[in-house]
């Protein structure tokens, strides 16, 4: 995952053509790579997702999968965008060549925002003390719940919800709130929640799939932000008030939790 | 007892495995510091119950096989190891997971040996046995483990005293998928259906048949693929099957397509787990791990990530007694015992239920 | 000269793109005939400006076509027809020409795009380029009877026929548009949706 590996991976052909600023590699995951570059004009930043060919896979199978996955991701993004769910817009793509350009989302990942906010708490490992003003964090949890509610309402499940796959996009025109001395910290959890990385997303209306989506986030949240685990309930409440069919999903979530990873297994 | 096992310079365990159609008994020697012992395989004997082509092994027949061969295999293991009964510190056996009847027959036999010889018992998780043996043989210290066999398909990585399951099959195991496909084509079960599929696949490859590709995050599913290859096998027999190039496809093409598809899925979920935990070592264990094409694909993936793949040969990949002896002895050295009254076995026994006290 | 050279990101200098905008074009019939007869002197993309939302919208189509030209993956006879087809959300070529192409008797305002792919870098030199640009402009000016107009968002906004655009890009009854009150925001959102529809063409 080190950036040093960068050199051994050739960029997609589309990025070998000149641009006003050279593309930069942002992340290198198992799925593919994310570059920051520009679309059409120098003042239009974009994220380019590239799924390179997998040398281990039969070329026919590889081509089929790459194309199908990029297409499916783009379709999900378009659907969300039309419905007003906060996700990046698709700018351009070539599914056969394995790339897609998307809107560049400014800001920081929610994970970073929450950790910055929690980081200024005195003792490590401790829960947020009772009585501390946690309003900004509670607000953020509500916004996340609302975004996921809106997502599920459109018939899309994300498939990999974590606080790294959500951005906090600064609100245009600046913010009004945030008391003296608290400003930096408050700002860390401000902004519009934008859901990103739909590489594992599917179109589904089933309670089970939606519940698993929430469960994945719940587990990720607990392991990433153990000190704020308690606030997850706020997120679910907000999800419930945004999404009419939430109550049956939340009942299913109970089942999914009970089941946990206790799937039956035979030797 | 009185004797502190960790102070002993040489520790010896006898392991009995019989969770599926292989009966295996092996003897292992650990020397030096119990926290990081050197392991030596003193013996590793196996006898396999092979069912006729077109059939699978049934629990009842398999258990009968294990009971019939236990004494013979145990005697051979002791003779090969060249040790006295007095040298043995503990008897290890597979507690699960696996098929009920075969597990029970071997557990009874192990218990009998323990009572007969006055040794302590150690119940071992079969999957942990594979992982520890794989680590010991290959020297992979912190790998992502792909455990693939007739009953299991898991992607595992160690964290905080447990082997955690990052991904697994949502329905049948990959080995089960291969075994059942072999039955559809009446491919021989000798030495193993998977091995014969691989030999046949080498003659295919003119076309890649379109099979479902079912990966969900780090999990995967094989039942849809099995249904499809069974349909295609039936079409082929009725001379009604045509490949993407319009020509009739062969059994070899089916084997080839099945291998390419299911192994690509396994490599993909392994890669995802590697990215997730930040490791670039892969260890393949379990019977399906013997497959050369799987090893080759895994090596290509690992090389692409600047890492390496570790695999063992059929002596250790395929179920065996030595891995049970080894993992059992590791636990025994940390003070773990299975009292005779608790020496049960269980068909369901998750890899992450075991407290791995012997690792940091 | 009202022929603008378009410099797009991720397009190599060997691929030169020029565009001009004319209002009140009076000889669409003639231009259409040249296209139908495949007159090689008229290798242009003629785009009906009433179906175009903005400069960015146009550039997205041009970029898509140029990229296919560079990759050798054109799905229509040439890069110019590919530009017209790239404005569509499906792969129906006739449909694309009816919507975005030149239609005698209907098209009033016209965008003309010319793509030149040089095989050698020598042709990319500034002086050669200037000559090319001048020659293209001379030819266009000679044959397109209309008022040259700057290719800007402000000018394009005057010619956009929204009912058509909304129909072509399925923008009617889209929740994300309906809740926007501000006209400028609506325009931007529509532009994004149109570009997205084009990017997902045929999926």
Image (cartoon, rainbow, N blue to C red):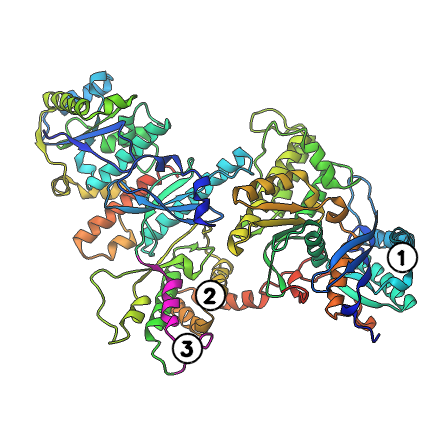
Residue B6 quadrant: bottom right
**In this view, the mark in front (1 or 3):** 1
User: Mark number for residue A224?
Assistant: 2
What residue is pinned by disc 1?
B83
Residue C114 location, quadrant: top left
Residue at coordinates 24% horizontally, 43% vertically from top-left?
A42
Q: Mark 3 lies on which chain?
A: A
2 vs 1, front mark: 1
Which one is nearer the viewer's eye here, A44 or C25? Answer: A44
Give the quarter of the image for residue C162: top left
Q: Is mark 2 on a helix, strand or loop?
A: helix
Distance CA(mark 2)–CA(mark 3):
15 Å
Numbered mark located on residue A128 in the image: 3
- In this view, the residue farthest toward the left is C147
Is B85 colored magenta in this rendering?
no
Look at the image and give the residue range highlighted in magenta: A107-130
Q: Which of B224 and A104 is in front in this view?
A: A104
Identify the residue at horizontal 83%, vertical 76% (top origin).
B2
Q: How far apart are marks 1 and 3 (CA)?
A: 61 Å
- Please determine whether, in this image, residue C61 is positioned above or below residue A48: above
Q: Is residue C165 left or right of residue B218?
A: left
Mark 2 to mark 1 CA distance (whole Å): 52 Å
Q: Position of residue C198 (x, y in %)?
A: 31, 39
Q: Is residue A146 above or below residue C42?
A: below
Query: Tag 1, which secondary structure?
Result: loop
Q: Mark 2 or 3 closer to N-term?
A: 3
Q: Are the residues flagged by discs 2 and 1 in contact, CB closer than 8 Å?
A: no
Assess whether mark 3 and mark 1 are in contact (beta carbons under 8 angstroms).
Answer: no
Apparent side of residue C96 relative to residue B271 in the rendered image (left or right)? left
Badge 2: how crowded within 10 Å, few (<14), some, or many (20+)?
some
């Amino acid at each position: 995952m080190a950036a040093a590996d960068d050199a051994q991976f050739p960029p997609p052909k589309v990025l070998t053509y000149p641009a006003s600023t050279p593309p930069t590699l942002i992340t290198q995951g198992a799925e593919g790579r994310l570059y920051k570059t520009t679309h059409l004009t120098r003042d239009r930043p974009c994220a380019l997702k590239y799924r390179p060919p997998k040398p281990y896979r039969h070329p026919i199978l590889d081509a089929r999968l790459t194309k199908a996955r990029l297409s499916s991701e783009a379709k999900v993004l378009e659907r969300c965008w039309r419905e007003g769910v906060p996700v990046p817009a698709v700018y351009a793509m070539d599914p056969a060549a394995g790339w897609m350009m998307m809107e560049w989302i400014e800001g920081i990942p929610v994970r970073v925002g929450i950790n910055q906010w929690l980081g200024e708490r005195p003792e490590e490992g401790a829960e947020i003390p009772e009585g501390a003003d946690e309003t900004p964090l509670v607000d953020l949890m509500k916004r996340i719940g609302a975004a996921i509610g809106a997502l599920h309402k459109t018939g899309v499940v994300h498939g990999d919800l974590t606080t790294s796959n959500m951005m906090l996009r600064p609100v245009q025109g600046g913010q009004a709130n945030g008391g003296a001395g608290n400003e930096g910290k408050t700002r860390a959890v401000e902004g519009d929640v934008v859901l990103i990385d739909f590489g594992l997303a599917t179109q589904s209306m089933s309670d089970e799939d939606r519940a698993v989506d929430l469960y994945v986030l719940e587990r990720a949240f607990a392991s990433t932000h153990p000190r704020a685990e308690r606030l997850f309930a706020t997120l679910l409440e907000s999800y419930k008030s945004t999404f009419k069919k939430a109550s049956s999903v939340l009942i299913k979530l109970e089942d999914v939790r009970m089941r946990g990873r206790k799937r039956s297994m035979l030797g | 007892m009185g004797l502190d096992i960790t102070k002993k310079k040489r520790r010896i365990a006898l392991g009995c495995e019989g969770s599926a159609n292989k009966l295996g008994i092996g003897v292992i020697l650990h020397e030096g510091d119990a926290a990081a012992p050197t392991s030596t395989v003193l013996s590793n004997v196996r006898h396999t119950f092979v069912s006729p082509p077109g059939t699978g092994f049934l629990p009842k027949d398999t258990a009968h096989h294990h009971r019939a061969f236990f004494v013979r295999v145990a005697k051979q293991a002791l003779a090969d190891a060249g040790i006295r009964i007095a040298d043995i510190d503990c008897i290890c056996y597979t507690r699960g997971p696996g098929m009920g009847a075969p597990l029970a027959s071997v557990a009874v036999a192990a218990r009998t040996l323990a009572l007969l010889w006055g040794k302590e018992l150690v119940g071992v998780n079969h999957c942990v046995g594979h992982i520890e043996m794989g680590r010991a043989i290959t020297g992979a210290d912190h790998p992502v483990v792909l455990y693939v066999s007739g009953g299991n398909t898991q992607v595992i990585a160690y964290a905080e005293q447990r082997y955690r399951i990052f991904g697994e099959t949502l329905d049948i195991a990959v080995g089960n998928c291969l075994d059942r496909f072999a039955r559809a084509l009446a491919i021989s079960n000798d030495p193993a259906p998977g091995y014969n599929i691989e030999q046949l696949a080498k003659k295919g490859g003119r076309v890649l048949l379109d099979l479902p590709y079912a990966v969900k995050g780090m999990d995967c599913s094989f039942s849809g693929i099995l249904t499809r290859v069974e349909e295609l096998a039936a079409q082929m027999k009725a001379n009604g099957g045509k490949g993407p190039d319009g020509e009739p496809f062969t059994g070899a093409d089916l084997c080839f397509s099945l291998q390419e598809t299911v192994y690509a899925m396994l490599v993909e979920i392994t890669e995802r787990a590697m990215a997730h935990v930040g490791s670039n070592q892969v260890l393949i264990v379990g019977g399906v791990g013997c497959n050369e094409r799987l090893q080759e694909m895994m090596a290509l993936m690992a090389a692409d990530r600047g890492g390496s793949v570790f695999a063992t040969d059929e002596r250790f990949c395929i179920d065996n007694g030595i891995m049970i002896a080894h993992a059992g002895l590791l636990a025994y050295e940390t003070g773990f015992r299975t009292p005779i009254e608790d020496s049960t076995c269980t068909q369901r026994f998750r890899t992450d239920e075991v407290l791995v006290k012997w690792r940091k | 000269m009202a022929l603008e050279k378009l410099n797009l990101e991720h397009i190599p200098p060997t691929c030169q793109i020029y565009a001009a905008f004319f209002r009140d074009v009076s000889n669409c019939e003639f231009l259409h005939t040249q296209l139908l007869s495949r007159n090689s002197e008229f290798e242009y993309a003629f785009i009906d400006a009433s179906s175009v939302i903005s400069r960015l919208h146009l550039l997205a189509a041009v970029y898509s076509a140029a990229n296919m030209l560079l990759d050798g993956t054109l799905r229509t006879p040439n890069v110019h027809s590919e530009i017209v087809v790239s404005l569509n959300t499906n792969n129906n070529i006739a449909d694309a020409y009816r919507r975005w192409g030149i239609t005698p008797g209907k098209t009033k305002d016209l965008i003309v795009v010319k793509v030149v792919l040089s095989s050698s870098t020598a042709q990319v030199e500034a002086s050669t380029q200037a000559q090319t640009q001048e020659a293209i402009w001379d030819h266009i000016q000679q044959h397109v009877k209309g008022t040259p107009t700057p290719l800007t968002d402000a000018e394009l906004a005057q010619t956009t026929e929204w009912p058509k655009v909304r129909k072509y890009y399925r923008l009617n009854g889209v929740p994300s548009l309906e809740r926007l009150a501000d006209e400028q925001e609506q325009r931007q959102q529509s532009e994004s949706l149109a570009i997205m529809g084009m990017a997902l063409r045929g999926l």
